[in-house]
Every structure is written in structure tokens, then in C-alpha cells.
Image (spheres, grey):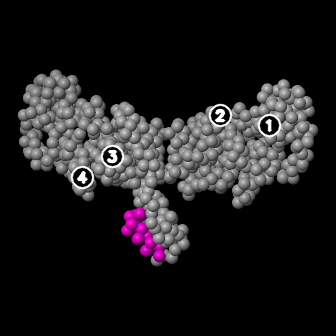
Amino acid sequence: MDYRQALVALNLIEGLGPVRVRLLLDHFGDAPAALGATREQLLQVRGIGQETAEAIANWEKTIDLEAEWKRIQEFGCRIVALQDEEYPALLRQIYDPPPVLYVKGQMLPKDKNAVALVGSRMTTHYGIETARKLGFQLAYLGVTVVSGGARGIDSAAHQGALAAKGRTIAVLGTGINLITPPENAKLFEQIAANGAVITQFPFNRPGDKQSFPIRNRIIAGMTLGTVVVEANLTSGALITANFANEYGRQVFAVPGRIDSPRSKGCHDLIKKGAKLCEGAEDILSEFEYLFPPSNKPPSPAETGALPALELSEHERMVYDTLGHEETSIDEVISKSGLPASAASVTLLSLEMKRLIRQLPGKLFVRNQ
Amino acid sequence: MDSRQALVALNMIESIGPIRARVLLEHFGDAPAVLRATREQLLQARGITQENAEAIANWEKTIDLDAELKRIQEFGCRVVAQQDEEYPALLRQICDPPPVLYVKGQMLTKDRNAVALVGSRMTTHYGIEAARELGFQLAYLGVTVVSGGGRGIDSAAHQGALAAKGRTIAVLATGLNWITAAENAKLFEQIVASGAVITQFPFDRGGDKQSFSIRNRVVAGMTLGTVVVEANLTSGALVTANFANEYGRQVFAVPGRFDSPRSKGCHYLIKKGAKLCEGAEDILHELLPPKNLWVTLP
């Protein structure tokens, strides 16, 4: 049994968290020795009680290591242990790093330039847009985007990074074989191909109230800073921000409208000292020392120049009524002054030209 | 000629700003003495140039004080001088308070609990809503809402305060008779009835780049704090925020969407250390000692 297998076994023992695993490793030298120890030897370790000692001494009766190992191989993931080079360097610096990570995909040395984008599962269109845009900008500039792979902001952040053909890592709050939410199966495949899907939980561990905060620790721990894109006052994203703060990492928050409850969490963070973030620039300016000058955000002159649009008169009238905020079809009709039929035909043709998008509820926004 | 009339005359001399006026008053004791002084005596005052001395010594030739006093009466406004009790107490504390204010309406003692709401003239629907909401909340809680009476955010802030039947003061960048935003005539009437419309400029003075900036000083100077509701990066509201900062008053900014250029000025202020403001609570929390926070928000 090598140290990786032994660590997997230790990680499978319930009631044994990262801090106590580290105590055991410090005491016995390595994982196989800890597993081979007798009950009496185990009891000499600081913080190990009767119950835990019992559980470790009898691990072979309760844990089916071989089955887990087989599942790991069949699933096509790998085990990365704390002492492996692939283990995220920043994560190793926190006081309770998980002893093993289940990794599907690849973590590269450059992933140490990682920033977390987090937020609520329930979001507004604004939040999704923002997450996607920030994910894109950061990934485009060579920063690895880390998020939780959940619905809402998380998914949008990963998608943004993927759209920029950049790197992204999803940290799950469940076993790696449980895909939550189920509609993200395709997304996880893409993430594994352009980064990694990782978790500290063994196979078949479902997500619960406990596992998500533990996941949030990893997200905050393995990144240089955490950006809260959109969060209400009870969102788990605020927990991630708290951990980031605890680990001495920078916290950013994206502002929103003051009448939107979904931005209240962000505003609260800014009031408490988080940095207001309007774009990747604000994030990178904080970590300037890490990035060579060529990684500076492109100036508006380089990226902002849109090719001249060739629009018909009607198209121009309708396009001018739209902005980055949702506009209803009624507003488009009244603002453009076109008859309803002409307006909807024109909206369709603009949509075909990919200049605008239709949102649920006959709402329209510009594409960039 | 009493000292108030002399101050009006002094205020009408274009090259004499608040700081020179104060130097002269300190040197000669009172305003009538300044106006009586000879060219040579005037030159002895610190910072007074040949040109200034000339203008003051010959004031009777260039300034029609009687006409101005008559217009003040006809217009139904009053002149409040720095030594008057009605003069805003906070404004008296800054380094360059205007020597006189033309006041239409009434300034009360409780108006020292004043907060400025400022922002761009060009706004979004969101900015207007936010200004009206904040104006309402503050006025409802007994805070006097001070703004510039301009289009956009200013008007919305005044309207919000009026809707709450609270007090509000408009500080103009022009003479009182010169209503910059003609559509605001009705609004000004209402403000006069529930507070005051004030200015430091004599009648017929038009608004220009300089006068707006001077007005912004007064707005920042007479309030406990300045809230920038919506401003782009070139808005005059940032000038007001700067003055507030200079006078040691708290600066607040209302955030908006990160992709809205009309909120960029506010976000810039927050990054520089202004307090993020989501509602009247955030403002009162900063300005009042907690024990006075007996009010509950509507």
C-alpha cells in the first residue's frame, strides 16, 4: 500500500478531518504508518480520542479501500496528495489543507495564478452576465478561474473562462462521481478538458450543509483572491469570502443596484472592506507583482473598437432602443416608433445577426 | 448704509471672492469701513492687488446698490450675512464661507442636520429612483436634504424630500432670479415653502463653469456629508465630493451596475474610500451617534 492509497483510506474514515489527519501524519511520519498503528499508539497523538482511535485501528473492517481504488481508476480520475507536486501550492499554505484531492483533468503549475469567482445559485441576468464577463477576462489574461461548479454564478464563471479558451477549475462539494446539478454534466467534461474538476470527498459522498462550506474553504484556500459576483445576505459565497479573509487572501465584490436584494451581500462586503471590482483590471491591479507587464488588461483601444455595423434603417432604430439592461418588446415598440409587426420582424433579424439576444419574457438585450 | 447693505455691495464686486472679503473685513473691522477706505488703505490689506483696490475704491461708480436692494425686496428674498444666526453653522466653519447668502424661504436651526444629495444632470432611470428614494428617506427622518436644484439627480432629491413633507434646500449657481432649469420654476416654489432656495451670487449673475464649482463648495460646506447618487467620471458631483472631503465631511456613494458608465464615478469614489450607501440607514449610521438613532426606516 503506497502513501496515496493510505491517505485515501484515512480520508474515508468518517470523523477524521484535515486537521487531525495532519496531526497523525506528523506523529507517525506517513500515512501507512498511521494506518498500521495500534489503538494504544494512536491514543498518544494529541487530539485523538477513544472513538477515533478505534475507527482508525479497525479501518479495514469498515472501509473498502480496494473498491474505492477501483472506482478511481474506472472513473478516470487521479489522487493528488498533499506532498505531490500537482497539489495547489496556495492550498498547502492554509492550516487545514485536505490530505488528498480527487482530480479529474490536470492541474498545472501556472494554476497557482488562480482567482475564485463565486456567487449565489439564484441569480439575476445581470449577475450571470457579470460572472461570464469576469470569467472571460481573467481567463483571457492567463488567470485560472476557480469556482464551485454549481448553478448560477459558478456555471457562468466557468463558461466565461471556457469561452476565452482559458483555464478553469471546478471544486465540488460532493463525491466526484455525483454530478450536481445534473445539467452540468457537459460543462464538467469541458472543465476537465481545460483544467480540472476536483474534490476532497470520496466517491458517492452527497452534498449537504457541511460539505459545501468545506468546499468553500478549498476554493478560498487555493486562490489568490475571491471575487463575490452576486450574493444576497445569506449566500454561501459570503462564507467563501470569509475564509479568503481568514487565509489572508484579498476579497473583491461586484456592486449592483441598491434596490436589488441579490447584490446586498456584495455591498455588505464592500462596506466591510472588500475591494470594489468593476472588471478584471481591478483584480489584477491587486496582484500586479505576479503578472508580467504583457499580461496587463488590453486597453479599450485594442479591444473596444467594434467593427462598424451595417444595419438597415429599421434595424438601427430598434438597435438604438436596446442597451445592456433588459428591455421589453413594448418598450422597443414605443421607443422606436415602429409598428409592432415591423418591430418584431426587426428584432428577429437583429437576433439572427447575433447583435441582440432574447431573454425569457420577451425581453431583449444587446450582445456586448 | 448698514453693514448688511455694505456686504451686499462688497459681494457684488466681481474680483472680490470670499477669502479676500474675509481678509478685508478682518483688516477694517466691518463692511462699511471697507467700502469707505481709500485706495492706499486698501492696498495695505494682505492679498489685495492694485486692481482690487481700484475696484473697491470706485465701487459706487460700477455697482448700483440701491437697485440691487430694491430687487431683493421685490423678489421677496432676504440677505443673510455670516454673523447672522440664520447663516448655516457648518458653512461658517469652512475656510472660505461666502460673506452673504441671498435666501428665499427660511433656514431653521434644525437645518444643520443637513445631508447633500448630488449627481449628474444626465441620469438613468435608476439614478432618479435612487435619488428620490434617498431624499424621501432622509427628509422623513428629519434630515434636511441639500442639493443644487439642477436637472436630473438634484431635482429628484428635492422632489423626494418634498414628497416626505420634509425640509430641503436648493443652492443655486446663479442669481436667484435666474432659473437655470426653467422647468424647475414650480419645484423652486415648493422648495421655498418647505425650506429655502439660496445662492451667494447677486441678481442677474448667470451660471458658468466657475459659479457651478463655487456653488458645489457651498453644498459640501453646509452639510454633514455628501452622497453622490449617480455620477460618471467627469461629473461635477465628484467636485462636490472632493470639497466635502477637503472640509472633513463624510463622502458617500451609491453603487450601480458595474457596466453602467453613469455609475463609474460612484465606484471610483468607493474605491478611494467613500462609504458605500444603500439607503438612509448607511448615512445616519455614520453621522449620528447611535443613541440618536431612534428612528425606524419607512
Magenta segment main secondary structure: helix
Evaluate whether label 3 is on the same chain as label 1: no
Q: Position of residue B257 (x, y in %)?
A: 48, 51
Mark 3: amino acid: Ala
Q: What whole-number distance in Å separates the C-alpha atoms at marks 4 and 1?
A: 71 Å
Disc number placed over residue A139 in the picture, else none: 3
Pick the quarter of the image with the N terminus of chain A: top left
The crowd level at tag 3 (other Cα within 10 Å; few <14, some 14-19, many 20+) is many
Closer to the N terminus: mark 3 or mark 4? 3
Q: What whole-number distance in Å separates the C-alpha atoms at marks 4 and 2?
A: 56 Å
Question: Residue A10 vs residue B223: left or right?
Answer: left
Question: Residue A291 vs residue B29: left or right?
Answer: left
> What is the magenta range?
A342-359
* Residue at the spot 61% in from the left edge and 45% down from the top edge: B237
Disc 1: host chain: B
Disc number placed over residue A190 in the picture, else none: 4
Q: Residue B46 falls in which quadrant of the image? A: top right
Mark 1: amino acid: Ile
Tell me the SS state at disc 1: loop
Disc 2: host chain: B
Vertical position of residue B184 compared to residue A166: above or below: below
Q: Verify CB contact (< 8 Å) between mark 2 and mark 3.
A: no
- In reply to whether residue A358 is colored magenta, the answer given is yes
Task: Looking at the picture, tell me which residue is in the foreground, A183 or B179.
Answer: B179
Evaluate whether label 2 is on the same chain as label 1: yes
Q: What whole-number distance in Å separates the C-alpha atoms at marks 3 and 4?
A: 14 Å
Disc number placed over residue B247 in the picture, else none: 2
Report the mark closest to the observer, 2 or 3.
Answer: 3
Residue to which mark 1 is pinned: B16
Mark 2: amino acid: Tyr
